[in-house]
Amino acid sequence: MTEDNEWMKTIQNENEYLKDQVRLLRENYELRSLLSQHYENSHEGRIVTSHPAPVYPNARSPGQGELELNSKKNGRIVGEIAFQLDRRILAYVFPGVTRLYGYTVSNIPEKIKQASMKCLDGSVDEKKHRAMMQRYLSLAARLEKMGYNRDVHPVFSEFLINTYGILKQRPDLHSSPLHSSPADLRKIVIDIVPSKFLGDTLLLLNCLCELSKEDSKPLFAW
């Protein structure tokens, strides 16, 4: 009976995992559809937004091309928020690792195992493995108190990065102070992200702000 119960529990866990993956794929499709509709309507002169259009006093009204450029740039800021949070998490778990190509928050446990292997015989350095795992679990516990879900938000973060992109160059904090302002970034997120995904995106921003306070670095750190 014990083996049967364990087998049923395993099947149930796998089913829950598959349901989560299907839900994320469906939300991915829905968000891309919403974004596509948004830009199609923008091209037709019908910008879909619940906020009033900005007023530009003492300046000429921007043309359609300029509006599209500003919207695209702000979209990259949304992706950059997710990217910066992921980089913060990886840098904390893997201190001293400067080249993080192939590292994602989703595959941290796997990368911990790889990073703790000894070069000579391929065995695991238990002390190194334990130290990295403790850093990962302690950080995860702090983020989970803010609502971060390890089974959902790493994938959602990758989705935002793939959907919106990231900034092409380091912003000048003196000429573009909004990159260091949580309030301004929050406004951009609210303006850009569809309401269905707004809560999770704002949660990522909150987590980034918290980690920025801890390491005393700018929100967008390079």
Image: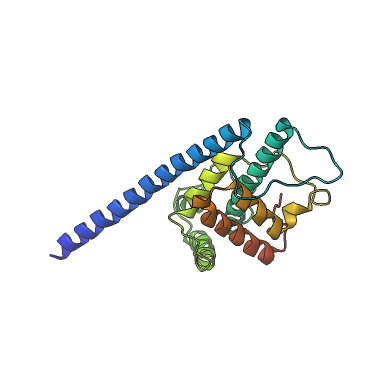
Q: Nearer the viewer, residue 129 or 156?
A: 156
In the image, is residue 144 above or below residue 24? below
Which of the 4 image quadrants contains residue 45?
top right
Residue 180 image offset from top left, x and y in percent: 74, 56
Residue occupying image coordinates x 49% and y 54%: 153
Residue 17 image offset from top left, x and y in percent: 34, 52
Which of the 4 image quadrants contains residue 38?
top right
Residue 147 image offset from top left, x and y in percent: 50, 64
**Figure disc tally:** 0
Residue occupying image coordinates x 71% and y 32%: 64
Q: Nearer the viewer, residue 160 or 222?
A: 160
Task: Please say which color scheme the image uses.
Answer: rainbow
Residue 66 image offset from top left, x and y in percent: 74, 34
Residue occupying image coordinates x 45% and y 48%: 122
> In this orientation, does residue 105 appear?
no
In the image, is residue 14 above or below residue 147? above
**In the displayed structure image, the side of residue 69 where residue 104 appears, left or right:** left
| Residue sitting at the far right | 58
